[in-house]
Image (spheres, rainbow, N blue to C red):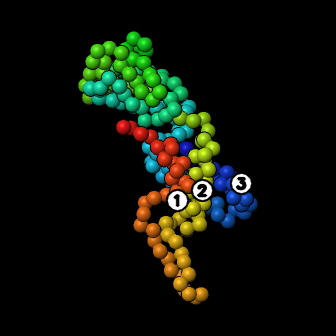
Amino acid sequence: MGANLITIQEYKLHNSINSTNQDAQLKALIPQVSDLVKSYCRRTFIDHFDEIKTEVFDGGYNTFLLKETPIVQIISVSESDNYGQTYTKLTKFQDWVNQDDKIIGLTAGAFKHKINGYKVDYFAGYEAVPQDLRLAVLDLVQYYMRNDSAVHNTKSITPNTMQVEYITSANFPVHIKRILDQYMADYA
């Protein structure tokens, strides 16, 4: 799903790790955790800061809600009369305007229903992962590292016996979930 939200070096520095013993496991785990966070939050954060994001809409509404935020720059809003085979640019401040993460049509019945009728090209996201989100990703990687990349708890029953209890809840640890929920895209 694009760029990792943290690097192995950032994880090792955060946890004061100097050895290379866990590098192979971290190399596999960090992309998985990055993809998990992006999927959970329904956005990529850094993938489209300097790489164009293109979204295609069918119309039928006066507003298009863009998936990636915050918006850095709208490159173009275009319309197609041939199901997306070719597009013609619409004029900003005449046909459309953007407000936050929305493209708003300025004419009556602005974005008529057309299959693949509208295309928006834009840059969005962050140049660098916000510090609180970075900390949540670091903690989530650490959480999986401590649990052998599985969601379970171990507890002693007797001095010679350990019991593994697999957690059936899909919830993140509370301190991580609190941060991720702040970054979750809300399409409502």
Specify few, some or many for label 3: CA neighbours under 10 Å numbering under 14, 14-19, or 20 or more: few
Which circle marks residue 65 in the picture?
none
Considering depth in this image, is 103 or 169 the residue closer to the camera?
A: 169
Secondary structure under the numbered disc 3 in the rendered image: helix
**Which amino acid, mark 1?**
Pro
Q: Which of the two marks, 3 or 2, is nearer to us in this view? A: 2
Residue at label 1?
173
* Residue 117 located left or right of residue 129: left
Q: CA distance from mark 1 to mark 3?
A: 22 Å
* Residue 47 located left or right of residue 64: right
Q: CA distance from mark 3 to mark 2?
A: 13 Å
Is 98 rendered above or below residue 94?
below
Residue at label 3?
13
Secondary structure under the numbered disc 1 in the rendered image: loop
Considering depth in this image, is 62 or 59 the residue closer to the camera?
A: 62
Q: Are marks 2 and 1 in contact (CB under 8 Å)?
A: yes
Q: Earlier in the sequence, mark 3 or mark 2?
A: 3
Question: In the rendering, at what x and y percent does residue 91 appear?
Answer: 41, 13
Q: Earlier in the sequence, mark 2 or mark 1?
A: 2
Question: In the rendering, at what x and y percent does residue 143 appear?
Answer: 57, 62
Residue at label 2?
139
Q: Is residue 90 visible?
A: no
Q: Is residue 102 visible?
A: yes
The count of marks equals: 3
Q: Please identify the quarter of the rendering in which residue 62 is found.
A: top left
Q: CA distance from mark 2 to mark 1?
A: 9 Å
